[in-house]
């Protein structure tokens, strides 16, 4: 888990340090992150032979949807980085509305795939999936919060 956290911290630092990143750079970062994440899941989740194929097919679908949300999250972070020193009340309201929608969309995505994985495999595998996802999501949120300065009035 430490290796994963260090790699992810590097990705976040790079993202925040290069607010002009283009779509191709974001795709490369997401691809690297996705490979490390999949390796972590493969170590943690205990699948039998019958569950293996169906789990990874569902996981790949989940990741495609998660990446779309991730691109949006990166865009919001860039926007915040551009305006945290001089954010207006209107910008703050719009930004927070978008962040709340982002969080809810992420939670809904995880809930939906928990149910799909539960139906296709078993409760332990579905729970392991959610545990790893929550761990990663919490690490991401903590790293972002630690790297992003507080908004100024």
Image (cartoon, rainbow, N blue to C red):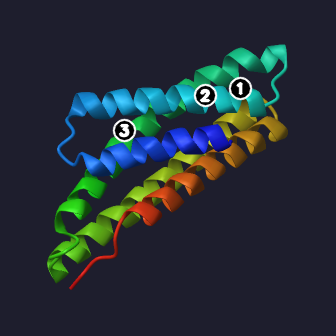
* Residue 133 shown left or right of residue 43 in the figure: left
Front residue (pair 5, 48): 5
Q: Identify whether 103 is placed above or below 66.
A: below
* Other residues around mark 3 within 10 Å, as few (<14) / some (14–19) / many (≥20): few
Q: Position of residue 32 (x, y in %)?
A: 46, 28
Q: Residue at x 52, y 46 (%)?
A: 109
* Residue 49 shown left or right of residue 74 in the figure: right
Looking at the rendered structure, the secondary structure element under dot 3 is helix
Sequence-wise, the earlier of marks 2 and 3 is 2
User: Residue 144: which disc?
Assistant: none
Direction bottom: furthest residue: 153
Front residue (pair 53, 4): 4
Q: Which residue is mark 2?
A: 38
Q: Residue at x 53, y 25 (%)?
A: 35
Labels 1 and 2 touching (C-beta < 8 A): yes
Q: Which residue is mark 3?
A: 68
* Residue 64 shown left or right of residue 115 in the figure: left
Looking at the rendered structure, the secondary structure element under dot 2 is helix
Q: Identify whether 70 is placed above or below 30.
A: below
CA distance separating discs 2 and 3: 17 Å
Sequence-wise, the earlier of marks 1 and 3 is 1
Q: Identify whether 104 is placed above or below 74.
A: below
Q: Which residue is mark 1?
A: 42
Q: Position of residue 19 (x, y in %)?
A: 21, 49
* Other residues around mark 2 within 10 Å, as few (<14) / some (14–19) / many (≥20): some
* Other residues around mark 1 within 10 Å, as few (<14) / some (14–19) / many (≥20): few
CA distance separating discs 1 and 3: 22 Å
Looking at the rendered structure, the secondary structure element under dot 1 is helix
Q: Residue at x 82, y 29 (%)?
A: 46
Front residue (pair 98, 114): 98
Q: Position of residue 55 (x, y in %)?
A: 68, 25
């Amino acid at each position: 888990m430490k290796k994963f956290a260090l790699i992810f911290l590097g990705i976040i630092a790079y993202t925040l340090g290069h607010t002009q990143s283009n779509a191709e750079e974001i795709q490369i970062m997401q691809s690297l992150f996705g490979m490390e994440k999949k390796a972590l899941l493969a170590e943690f989740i205990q699948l039998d032979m019958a569950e293996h194929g169906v789990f990874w097919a569902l996981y790949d679908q989940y990741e495609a949807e998660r990446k779309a949300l991730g691109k949006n999250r990166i865009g919001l972070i860039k926007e915040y980085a551009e305006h945290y020193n001089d954010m207006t009340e209107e910008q703050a309201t719009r930004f927070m509305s978008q962040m709340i929608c982002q969080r809810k969309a992420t939670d809904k995505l995880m809930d939906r795939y928990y149910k799909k994985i539960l139906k296709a495999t078993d409760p332990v595998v579905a729970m392991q999936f959610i545990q790893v996802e929550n761990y990663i999501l919490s690490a991401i949120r903590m790293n972002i919060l630690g790297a992003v300065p507080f908004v100024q009035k």
